[in-house]
Amino acid sequence: MVLVGLGKTEATISTNALILKNVSLVGSLGGSKEDLQRVLELISTGAIDNVITEVAFHQVPDAVDMLSEGRITGRLVVRVNPDIT
């Protein structure tokens, strides 16, 4: 699982995956809580356009290529369950 950006302030993870599947958990702080609040305010007022490219799970390899080639602007969202909108 990869989470880029602060989708939620808390998340539940499987310790089974961490231990048995040798999964790594890495965090990074790119700004303060106040920075994030200000950005969310700017998005909510329309001052910043939140650009999202959404792909189905089977399109992940092509989406990774698009990311590496700089053809994605904004966020890339992978839709795992096509029935969820």
Image: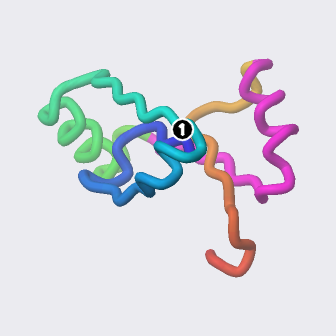
Q: Which residues are magenta?
A: 49-69
Q: Quadrant of residue 40?
A: top left
Residue 70 in magenta stretch: no
Residue 68 relative to residue 41: left or right: right
Residue 54, above or below 47: below
Write the residue at 41% across / 55% down: 13
| Total numbered labels | 1
Q: Position of residue 67 (x, y in %)?
A: 72, 27
Residue 74 relative to residue 25: left or right: right
Q: Amino acid at mark 1?
A: Val
Specify few, some or many for label 1: CA neighbours under 10 Å numbering under 14, 14-19, or 20 or more.
few
In terms of depth relative to the viewer, which is nearer, 31 or 12?
A: 12
Q: Position of residue 48 (x, y in %)?
A: 39, 38
Residue positioned most to the left: 34
Q: Position of residue 37 (x, y in %)?
A: 19, 42
What's the coloring here? rainbow
Write the residue at 35% across / 59% down: 12
Residue 71 relative to residue 59: left or right: left
Q: Quadrant of residue 85?
A: bottom right
Write the residue at 68% across / 61% down: 79
Residue 32, above or below 5: above
Label 1, on which residue? 23
Residue 57 in magenta stretch: yes
Q: Position of residue 32 (x, y in %)?
A: 17, 27
In terms of depth relative to the viewer, which is nearer, 82 or 45?
A: 82
In terms of depth relative to the viewer, which is nearer, 62 or 41?
A: 62
Residue positioned most to the bottom: 83
Dot 1 falls on a residue whose secondary structure is loop
In terms of depth relative to the viewer, which is nearer, 19 or 69?
A: 19
